[in-house]
Image (tube, rainbow, N blue to C red):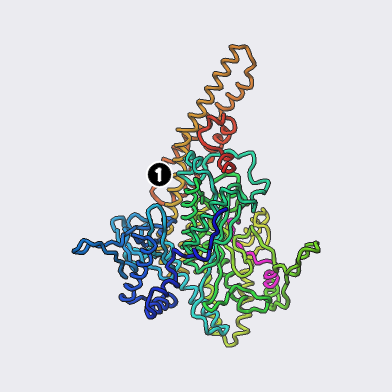
Amino acid sequence: MSEVLNVESIFAENVFTIGKMKERLPRKIFQEVKKVMDQGGELSPGTADIVAKAMKDWAVEKGATHYTHWFQPLTGITAEKHDAFVTHPDEDGKMLLEFSGKELIKGEPDASSFPSGGLRATFEARGYTAWDITSPAFVKEDAAGAVLCIPTAFCSYKGEALDKKTPLLRSMEAISEQALRIVRLFGNTEATKVVPSVGAEQEYFLVDREKYLKRKDLIFAGRTLFGAPPPKGQEMEDHYFGTIRERIGAYMRDLNIELWKLGVTAKTQHNEVAPAQHELASIYETANIAVDHNQIVMETMKKVAGRHKMACLLHEKPFAGVNGSGKHNNWSLATDTGVNLLDPGETPNENIQFLLVLACILKAVDIHGDLLRQSASDVGNDHRLGANEAPPAIISVFLGEQLEDVVKQLVETGIAATCKEGGILDTGVRTLPGFMKDATDRNRTSPFAFTGNKFEFRMVGSADSIGSPNTALNAIVAEAFCEAADILEQAEDFDIAVHDLIKEYLTKHQRIIFNGNGYSEEWLEEAKRRGLPNIKSMVDGVEALTTKKAVELYEKFGIFTKAELESRKEILYETYAKTMNIEALAMIDIGSKHIIPAVVRYTKTLADTVNALKEAEADARVHKELLSETTALLTETKEALKTLTQLSAEASRIEEARERAVYYKDKVKTAMEALRSPVDKLEMIVDKEEWPMPSYGDLLFEI
């Protein structure tokens, strides 16, 4: 029996929470800090010093010797530079531990080696990290010891955003300001801000670490670049929600403990559809904290996996032929007085504020579907979207029967007189209780689905930061709110004006609503008829960042400048090309140094056997056939390897970022697929003892 775990006692024990601040700070100092957290502004230098000392003392009590400004550059992962609390010894040789307000508020990491997309020259090294006072500091414990991590934004010397957090915080201010205008129209004078809340569901794979280390493709690329399908995949549907194996359960337990200590509200855990695939979901939090916490989740998943002699794979498609991994981004809006703007209530047809908010969101998603699609784009996600395992690449909105019916009534008559109800669930078993059903079913094929009191953006890739999707969501909805408020604030008769505006928005943007099967061929044709964009790859979606409407949107609310958008576009093209180059070089390395030599050894064994059978005057037909088939595939492999090597070299010589990325997508990627095809066939023929790496069966089922 394992010892009883007291979750309440360990939760957030490694977080400098508001409660801990309240305990450790003088009352007036705490009130000043809380005011800045709630309303913005700056701490006075004296207050900052007091907060820094209290934070340092708490961290030292937790065993911390260093602190770091923890930030999220455009690499997609987090970054940190550790500084010790130690100062120069005094005249008696005694070491003092100090941490000033200035060190808390501002850091100065070398910014020259982080992606900037041309915003700055390489020799311009200065960059700043600025404390995000709204996201609590925490102590991270690992083999390096305990480190105080201070969540920060990361900007250039000129104030340009070089990270995921700065635009997110800007977008949160924008949507709060515009959403407040909406709630004021409906008489809410108590709310002082509207906060986007996010709950992220994180999918991941676990494989045995010893086997992982024998797969260079997993090490270098995060996914298997070769691999024949195992005899069994996910077709029996027995892994989904199945009994969690003990080794995995032990991992999940330790993962939960680590996350709970860091204040991450890890709530749900289960087996996912594919073998060796699992999921962890967290409770809703303020958007920037949710983004921070999801980064912590991904880091902790990998760290804890190592302790259990496993490897955690966060790539969107680590294995061909089985479902890949995504990250469902559950997004909602609520006032600081607790009113959820996406709660339809029992009679949504009569809830005018909700209907206006809904109409604005539909408008935003319709107008800026390309931006939303782009925000969920990364190299790995190209392997999932539209592949009948994840939402299609076409942006649409699922509302469900109840709201679809309300929208239909409003569009056709201007009045929604009725509202469908869920009714009672009748199982037909007398001993089972009857209960109220939800008013609508769910749709797993929808990329943007209304699920009761929130929208679930289902397109985000498992390895990606949720910073960009939430920045885009906040921005496009802020614009729709702003345009609606501009009209309604000038209306002579608000009741008539709001009804007319709701009908107008729903009528103009109803094309974005789709409740059917997003995997069907019919939907592809219907979406095309409706004029909805079908952006099939990351490369095709990048240009959405700098369209006229995108630049106007982001500049209007101060979220991005045009220069910042151009820089991000450049980084995305570079990221795609670099990732594909790594994958291509890994395939070339594995193919030439491991697979071809292994197949040559096997063919020699076959040839020797054929010759021996001939000498013995025995039947060698089967062996000859195997030798012929293997040799033909080996020849195909060698030719494909030669082609991939040539195309990779040509791609690397292309200087313009977009042209290089397109070349990798259209030419190199095709050559990679051409190399994989004969190799996977060879794996089904060659003696397993000769094959140079663990198979899919070894990785997915032997854990």
401 in magenta: yes
Seen at 52% across and 81% down, the residue is 191
| Res. 526 in view | yes
Label 1 neighbour load within 10 Å: few <14, some 14-19, many 20+:
some
**Percent coordinates x, y for residue 258 in the rendering:** 48, 58
Amino acid carrying label 1: it is Ser
Which residue sits furthest left?
A: 91
Residue nearest the viewer, comparing 634 with 139:
139
Element type at marker 1? helix
Instruction: Say whether residue 401 is left or right of residue 659.
Output: right
Q: Is residue 606 above or below residue 190?
A: above
**Percent coordinates x, y for residue 516 in the rendering:** 68, 60
Which residue sits furthest bottom?
A: 492
**Percent coordinates x, y for residue 467 in the rendering:** 47, 62
| Res. 555 in view | no
398 in magenta: yes
Residue nearest the viewer, comparing 225 with 641:
225
Seen at 76% across and 67% down, the residue is 434
Q: Is residue 498 above or below residue 262?
A: below
Residue nearest the viewer, comparing 71 with 448:
71
The quarter of the displayed image where residue 440 is located:
bottom right
Seen at 49% across and 77% down, the residue is 193
Q: Is residue 138 above or below residue 461?
A: below
Question: Magenta segment range?
Answer: 391-407
**Dot 1 corresponds to which residue?**
652
**Percent coordinates x, y for residue 28 in the rendering:** 38, 80
Seen at 45% across and 33% down, the residue is 593
Q: Is residue 552 above or below residue 615?
A: below
User: How many discs appear?
Assistant: 1
Quadrant placement of the C terminus: top right
